[in-house]
Image: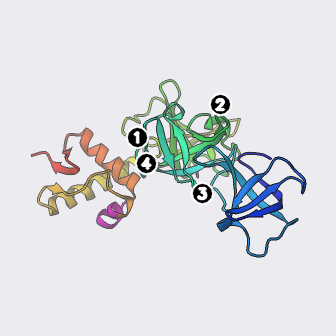
Amino acid sequence: MKLGEYQELIYIKKVDFGVYLGETENAEERVLLPAKQVPVEAKRGDKIKVFLYKDSKDRMIATTNEPKLTLGQFGVLTVKEIGKIGAFLDWGLEKDLFLPFKEMTQKVQPEDEVLVTVYTDKSNRLCASMKGLYNLLSTDSPYQKDDMVTGRVYEFSDNFGTFVAVDDKYSARIPSHEDHSYLRIGDIIDAKVVAVKPDGKLDLTLREKAYIQMDADAEKILELIESYAGVLPFSEKASPEVIKRETGLSKNAFKRAVGHLYKQRVIDITDGKIRLVR
């Protein structure tokens, strides 16, 4: 039986709290499918498609629910909370997916959307990692020079620049000579393709449309702060729903514009509020 993958297992035995499954009807190695997960029509000898993971007590368990990512896959998951040794991500299952601090390329915050891959740690538990994505992203994008694209920042390098997953799946990079100091891991950016390299990877620039849009967003936020008599009663840590309702911007666009204003020392951020610097 394979941890972190879908597989068809045979219904062997029913108990009060679920049914036991195995690779054959006489298999000694068995895994529990909890009662609430058992298909109504299922009976002994049937094959049931399940996903295997480990529960909070580190026991192998089956589920008919579908996780957002399986072993070896990569994709975007939302940070639910931060623990003592890492973060917990919304995985779509009863148990959240653990992202250890050592597997982060930058510290994350609750509600951040981050690109991760799923791996097994030394204790054979499924975990998330923000590392190693460069080699997993596709290099066969449909984009050409001068196209505008949308991507998610997933890693920074002092030597090579900012690494971006265009459409959350194509490999791209903003060269190191461009200013990326206001960007964070997970930010969504609009950029222009300046080159398609021989290996298919994209080189991007933020120096045109993205900067224009950020300036427009910053002006919009300044006008909003003015309407609140100079003190906006929430900051970039507010929920995406609040930010969207009050500003019309996505959380990432809001954070990007706020960071731009803060860098220019136009605003100050204290006690969860944004204030104009008089």
Q: Secondary structure at mark 2?
A: loop
| Residue 247 on the magenta span | yes
Marks 2 and 4 in Cβ contact (< 8 Å): no
Marks 1 and 3 in Cβ contact (< 8 Å): no
- Answer with left or right where residue 264 lies relative to residue 23: left
Instruction: Kindly identify which numbered label has been placed on residue 122.
Output: 2
Query: Measured from the top left, where is residue 225 in percent x and y?
Result: 19, 57
* Residue on which disc 4 sits: 81
Query: Measured from the top left, where is residue 185 in percent x and y?
Result: 46, 41
Query: Measured from the top left, where is residue 143 in percent x and y?
Result: 63, 50
Amino acid type, residue under disc 3 in the picture? Leu
Label 1 or label 3, whichever lies nearer to me, is 3
Residue range of the region highlighted in magenta in the rendering = 242-249
Q: Of 162 and 73, which appears nearest the observer? A: 73
Q: Secondary structure at mark 1?
A: loop
* Secondary structure mostly taken by the magenta-highlighted segment of the chain: helix
Figure quadrant of residue 217: bottom left
* Residue on which disc 3 sits: 93
Query: How far separated are the C-alphas under marks 1 and 4?
Result: 22 Å
Labels 2 and 3: the sequence-earlier one: 3
